[in-house]
Image (spheres, helix red, strand yellow):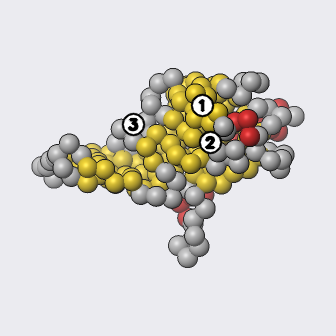
């Protein structure tokens, strides 16, 4: 039974990570997809502001399971699903971060929460250099019975390129099959 649940969660994460690249352009993008393993409503007790113990990640989860905002590890920048974030850098240039589809999945039987944050395009000028690309970040792990702590494995899949002033391009991407994984502990700092 546990193996079946683990397989189901793994299959769902794989579909969400690899499936977001080929969406038809004619259909509107659902900014945050929310599902539970057994089809029950998302537990409102998970709603609140969640902050990781390191790397700067933060999520605001609404009572229906949608993520209304996130602070990315990359630059500690706050983003909203479905909206491009534009910031002025210290050198006066415009940095842009455009989210792709995000997803939230909860398995009540296993107390397993999975969140996927896709960034469709990131462009950060760093005079005279430029960093651009995309990323998929997947967080999965067990939520405590009190629903205020989440032990998560963060796996990041990046596709970044750095363009230098001398015309060189450096590939800063992670392995697209395995990514890079780090253990994080999220604490709910506010509830609603």
169 sits to left or right of 18: left
Q: Are marks 1 and 3 in contact (CB under 8 Å)?
A: no
Number of numbered markers: 3
- Residue at (70% x, 36% y) in the render: 46
Q: Quadrant of the N terminus?
A: top right
Q: Above or below — where is 44 with respect to 132?
A: above
Q: Nearer the viewer, residue 128 or 190?
A: 190
Give x and y (percent) for residue 9.
72, 42
Front in this rendered view, residue 7 or 44: 44
Task: Give me the residue at 57% from left, 58% from top.
Answer: 31
- Sort mark 2 into few (<14), some (14-19) or many (20+) by Cα contacts within 10 Å: many
Residue at coordinates 66% horizontally, 31% vertically from top-left? Answer: 141
Mark 1 crowdedness (10 Å alpha carbons): few <14, some 14-19, many ≥20: few
> Dots 2 and 3: beta carbons under 8 Å?
no
Which residue is outermost to the bottom? 26
Residue in the foreground of this view, choosing between 78 and 137? 78
Question: Horizontally, is 126 left or right of 23 in the view?
Answer: left
Q: Can you see residue 18? A: no
Residue at the disc numbered 1: 190
Q: Is residue 92 left or right of residue 98?
A: left
Give the numbered dot on residue 76.
3
Q: Which residue is mark 2?
A: 61
Residue 150, visible in the rendered structure: yes
What kind of element bears circle 1? strand
Q: Is residue 123 left or right of residue 150?
A: left
Q: Nearer the viewer, mark 2 or mark 3?
A: 2
Q: Secondary structure at mark 3?
A: loop
Quarter of the image holding residue 48?
Answer: top right
Against 140, is 65 above or below?
A: below
């Amino acid at each position: 039974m546990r193996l079946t649940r683990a397989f189901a969660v793994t299959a769902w994460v794989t579909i969400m990570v690899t499936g977001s690249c080929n969406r038809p352009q004619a259909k509107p993008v659902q900014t945050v997809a929310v599902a539970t393993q057994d089809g029950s409503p998302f537990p409102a007790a998970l709603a609140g502001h969640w902050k990781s113990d390191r790397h700067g990640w933060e999520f605001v989860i609404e009572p229906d399971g949608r993520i209304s905002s996130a602070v990315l590890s990359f630059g500690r920048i706050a983003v909203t699903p479905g909206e491009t974030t534009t910031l002025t850098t210290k050198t006066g240039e415009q940095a842009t971060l455009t989210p792709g589809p995000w997803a939230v999945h909860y398995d009540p039987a296993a107390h397993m929460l999975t969140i996927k944050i896709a960034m469709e395009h990131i462009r950060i000028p760093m005079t005279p250099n430029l960093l651009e690309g995309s990323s998929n970040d997947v967080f999965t792990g067990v939520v405590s019975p009190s629903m205020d702590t989440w032990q998560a494995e963060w796996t990041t899949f990046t596709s970044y390129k750095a363009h230098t002033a001398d015309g060189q391009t450096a590939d800063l991407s992670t392995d697209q099959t395995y990514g890079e994984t780090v253990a994080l502990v999220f604490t709910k700092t506010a509830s609603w």
